[in-house]
Amino acid sequence: MVRAAFRVAEQQRSLNSKRVESMANGTQGAGDRKQPPDDEAALSARLQRLGKRLTEVSRPSETGSGPRQTADASAFARGFRLSTELVAGVLVGALIGWLLDRWLGISPWGLIVFLLLGFAAGVLNVMRAAGVVDERHLND
Amino acid sequence: MDPIHQFQIVNLFSLGKLGNAEIAFTNSAAFMLIAVVGLTLFLVLGTAGGRAVPTRLQSAAELSYEFVASMLRSTAGQEGMRFFPFVFTIFMFVLTLNMFGLVPYAFTVTSHIIITAALALTVFFTVLGYGLMRHGLHFFNLFVPKGVPIYILPMIIAIEILSFISRPISHSVRLFANMLAGHIALKVFAGFIILLGGALGAIGWVGGVLPFAMIVALTALEMLVAFLQAYVFAVLTCIYLNDAIHPGH
């Protein structure tokens, strides 16, 4: 494991020097601009490899504290979570719409509007739960 | 044979009357009591020794502490640790009830939505109360995401509020439905054995090995689900508490 960590550190160092290199190239002139895509692809591939290595190295310390990754692994639980999020949003929307209709006597409109809003809220919930949209951070 | 029968609430003895409603000590209450007493014993005995080289019990107690503490720290930050007793209690309570429910003839308290809804609403109102107490009206920034054009803001706010209100529902339904569905599935497969044996005699009993194998597998799955749902419940509690501590990021 120590060796693996060392290897990662080494790779990171070489990556850093490469980044400096490419930055230096960038200042030299626009003529080099045509070349970067290839370079960048290699760089991103290396970054990806580094990330994979890093998770490999850092994982053992995490498993020590509990069976966390079983929780992430269970697709069943994840799927169930997503479906309840959606249903809960729609239910709340329908309930509020229905109550508003009863209180204000605006019969179908409260239900129509709030059912749609509730559906949107449900989709938002699902996207948040799935990590498509950041939890509560839209802009910072 | 009736797969729903296991969820029936039975009055064990009456504690008196409140108005017209009878206050009874039910099997649900009995299992909650067992869970609480068992948990208390586990933690008190586990932490009594305080040895440098922990015994198995102490190790288990420490492990559960570390598990919840790291979960809370990673989702709600160091400040979230003031809610540690709350989250730890919820996690251990739900986990114990889920696990006890798997013991044959035991009653699964968390398979009733009234229990899970009470827990989820407790979390919901804790978040609301603490958020309002700590941040005052700034807490409602939670519903106003930044960088949204003004003309769609009213709609976004309505959606955010609905999304907030829907939390206790999804929070409670998830736990309740998982436990309910799992236990019904177990009972249905167990019923198959009886049905096969009753219909086909000796051949049926031999054929009953198949559903029996299924029950074994399902029990293992249910163990996983019992743990997982307690974990998910606690994690969501942490996430919601995080909103109370740091709203409107």
Image (tube, helix red, strand yellow):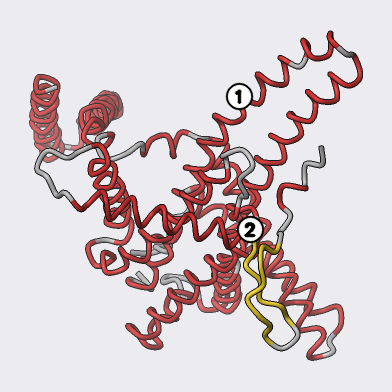
The spot of residue B21 in percent (x, y) is 73, 81
Left or right placement of residue B150 versus residue B44 in this view? right
Image point (79%, 14%), residue name: B205
> Residue B154 at x, y = what percent?
58, 79
User: Which label's residue is closer to the chain start, 1 or 2?
Assistant: 2
**Protein chain holding label 2:** B
Q: Which residue is mark 2?
A: B27
Of the 4 image quadrants, the one containing the C terminus of chain B is bottom left
Dividing the picture into quarters, in which one does residue B169 lie?
Answer: bottom right
Under mark 1, the amino acid is Val
Residue drawn at x 47%, y 69% is: B123
Where is residue B151 shown, x and y percent of the image? 56, 78
Find the residue positioned furthest to the front: B13
Question: In which quarter of the view is residue A110 placed?
Answer: bottom right
- Front residue of B1/A115: it is B1
Q: Residue furthest right?
A: B199
Quadrant of the drawing holding the N terminus of chain B: top right
Tell which tag, 1 or 2, sits nearer the viewer. Answer: 2
Query: Measuring 54% from the left and 40% from the top, which residue is drawn there?
Result: B225
Image height of A78 relative to B73, above or below: above
The residue type indicated by label 2 comes to: Asn
Q: Position of residue B164 (x, y in %)?
A: 54, 70
Helix, strand or loop status at disc 1: helix
Viewer-proximal residue among A139 and A60: A60
Label 2 crowd bin: few (<14), some (14–19), many (20+), radius 10 Å: many
Check residue B216 in the rendering and tell me which mark sits there, or answer none.
1
What's the chain of the residue with tag 1? B
